[in-house]
Image (spheres, coloured by chain):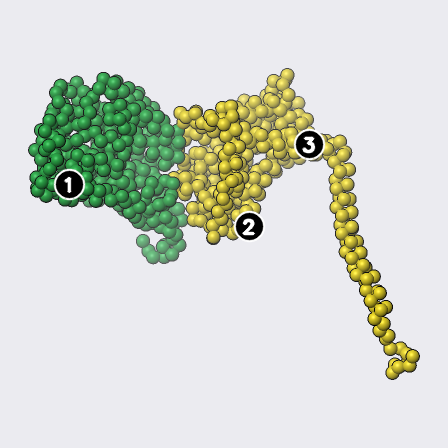
Amino acid sequence: MVGSLGGNEMQFDFFTWFGGLWDWILGILLWFWGIIKWLVIWILDIINGIWALAAVPENFMFLFRAVVMPGLIFLLLALIFTVWFTRKIWARVQDRRGPTHLGKYGGYQLFADAVKLMAKETIIPDKAKRWMYRILPSLLLVIVLIPFAFIPWDPYWNIMGPPGQAFGDLSVSLVLIFALLTAVPVFSLLIGWVTGSKYSLIGGFRSANNQFASEIPMVISSVGPAMLAGSLSMYSIVAAQTSIWYIVLLPINFATFLVASIASVGTFPFDAPVADSEIIFGWRTELSGIYFTVVYFAEFAEQMLYSAIMVALFFGGFNGLPFLPGIVNFLIKWLVVYFLFTVVTSSFYRLRQDQIVHLCWKYLLPLSVLNVVLVMFAIVYIPGLLPLVIGG
Amino acid sequence: MSPDILDEASEIWFGPQHVSAHGWATKLTLVGDYIVECDPNAGYFHRSAEKCLEFRNFRQGSMILERICMMEAFLAEYPYIAAVEKIVDLEVPERAKVMRTIMLEFNRIHSLQFWWGQFAGELGLFAMLLWPWVDREYTLDAFETLTGSRHTVSYETPGGVKYDFTPKFLTKMEIALSRVKERMPVFEDMLSGSPTFRLRTEGVGHYTLKKALKWGLSGPNVKACGYPMDLRKDDPDPNLAYDMIDWEVPTIHNEDHPGECDAFDRLLQRFKEIETSLDIIDKLLPLLPEGPIVDPKARAKANRLPEGESYGRVEGTRGVTTVWLKTMEKAQTPWRAKIRGPCFASYYSLKHIVPGARFADFPAIFGSLDPYPGWWDR
């Protein structure tokens, strides 16, 4: 064929084009399929890798401990028990009966409350930042639950095992716990800020004020046990108390830690952040439904956490009656300390914010610093002390 | 106050949906943590009691009054009865006079028990909120035995009282009073003996006697300044039995600030009020004469009143409670009844007491003044 371009012009043959059209479509489809296949294989590979990792006995046991016992599910059950226990103690102190109807001694009351709260409508105020409002309460609960990983419930059966093994306790876990707990009032302040109410904003600032007042005495109170044990690891501090519990040596430190931790949680009598006769419900005023439930759980989880830290630092943790498993020893002492905690919270009038700072800085801080100095002198000048406290 | 302070001020409404504001709303202007302005607002609890009184006859009217403030039902209904008894010439029997006085004082104890709990609850101790309320149940049981109702008692009537004391009631009253006596030291420990309570109330909500009288405060809020202004002594009602016995007007004299009072003094004053009431009841019970409890012609006499105008008043728990009554000739209902509750003055005096206090002190201040919204909104 001769054309204007000397035989080099393009020939358009409709049927050839039409015949190739399907190949082209098929090619595109195959290309997409390739991507999807690659993605699926990639995901399966990851799952495969995780599975292989989880199948390693040490890893599997770590996962099991983190999720079941003494991890998430154990904590959830403990939380349910704690709420019931608190309400009963409160009721007895106040000359009431507390929950009685659902279950034996009102044990199922929390389930009823939780169902009721979750079934409620979530009302988000117009002025609130919506996604912050939705995400912050859950973050608060997570940040409160993470430190439980470092609580030495048992000589072996912890979330983080004994130091030296795989997933062993960190050498600075005490510091890490306090670092995580410092974030709690930040979340309170943010919740107060983003929920769009003056009451909750005031409550948020009061919560920050509480932490500002109580954090320093609390951390300094924990220096005494750490110095005696010669370690900042929770596990080592507990392991050092085989001969003698530190409550015997450091009763004042325990008292300052107890008061400072109550102030840090922000429950009675340091409940200025949520004072209902002044600012309705403080930084929780605008939370409703499931978000309120989560924040409510977080408060109880924080109280549990502080009680557990006190057991570990001052009451010898898993040390105790030798014929009982370590975790049972721990839980018995934990119940006693929690009872003490709750009785203290239910028997004083609410303090004003400036009075909280006064109390924490004028009384708790000098006492705890004095105790640190005393411990230093004791370690240097009492010859038999160090072998006794470092013990096992 | 200079205007540049107010640039950083924020306004916050304390009520009407606030959990601690029982049907009232106060606008607070805050600078930081301090209250610089307090603007009390009435009108959230209005139930037109005065208009209702114009449609009730003279034996029914007192029941409207006791619904205004159920905590002091016996005391609230008395001024109306007193006003009616001043217009029409009724002969109240001696026995009814003594019984009335005993019930007024018994009711004062009940109202103060309620106040203890409420005040402690506002300051954040829920144990102290509920302990007096458990004791209060005994008192309410006694009320129920006497009148058939726990709160809306409608006990007094023009010319006497409606129900006679029964042995069962006297036993229950003795139980309730002995319970109060037994638990007074406990509550004194938990309130005035508690260091955290003193921290919250001492030096808070401070005012002088001169200002209190200027604002129109009455009752315990004035007596806490050390001034024995008590209607029971100053103007004894001929139909009550306060002049039959010897008793002292309870006052607080604080040597640190004579002639002034703060929230803590007002608490001590109310403790003394309870002691005085117990004392009066103890002295009156043996004097209880035999005889009728109501003027036999009261029903006929109080049915239609002559034209007149009268002013009945009583020393209530929260201050002087008065009713002004005007009737036309042969009237079955009042032409106009004006109620002057004690708490209007104490509520609006917040405007002068509160500025300068911290926000957290606000519940302590209004709690110690014992305001009840029924009395200013009626």
Task: Name the secondary structure under disc 1.
Answer: loop
Would you say residue B352 is visible in this rendering?
yes
Q: Out of A328 and B147, give the one closest to the viewer.
A: B147
Q: In this view, does A362 lie to the left or right of B324?
A: right
For disc 2, the marked residue is: A131
Q: In this view, does B376 lie to the left or right of A357?
A: left
Mark 1 chain: B
The outermost residue toward the bottom is: A4
Mark 2 chain: A
Residues flagged by tags 1 and 3 on a common chain: no
The outermost residue toward the right is: A1
Residue type, mark 3 in image: Phe
The correct choice, above or below, for B364 with respect to A317 in the image is: below
- Where is residue A61 drawn, in percent x and y? 71, 31
Residue type, mark 1 in image: Thr
Q: The yellow chain is which one?
A: A
The correct choice, above or below, for B285 with respect to A63 in the image is: above
For disc 1, the marked residue is: B333
Residue at the image position 35 percent from the left and 48 percent from the top: B28
Question: Which of the two labelled residues, at mark 2 and mark 3, occupies the earlier sequence position?
Answer: 3
For disc 3, the marked residue is: A64
Tell me the CA gap for discs 1 and 3.
81 Å
Tell me the CA gap for discs 2 and 3.
33 Å
* Crowd around label 1: few <14 · some 14–19 · many ≥20 (10 Å): many
Q: Residue A345 sits in which quadrant? A: top left
Residue at the image position 13 percent from the left and 19 percent from the top: B290
Q: Residue B47 sits in which quadrant? A: top left
Quarter that holds the C terminus of chain B: top left
Tell me the CA gap for discs 2 and 1.
62 Å
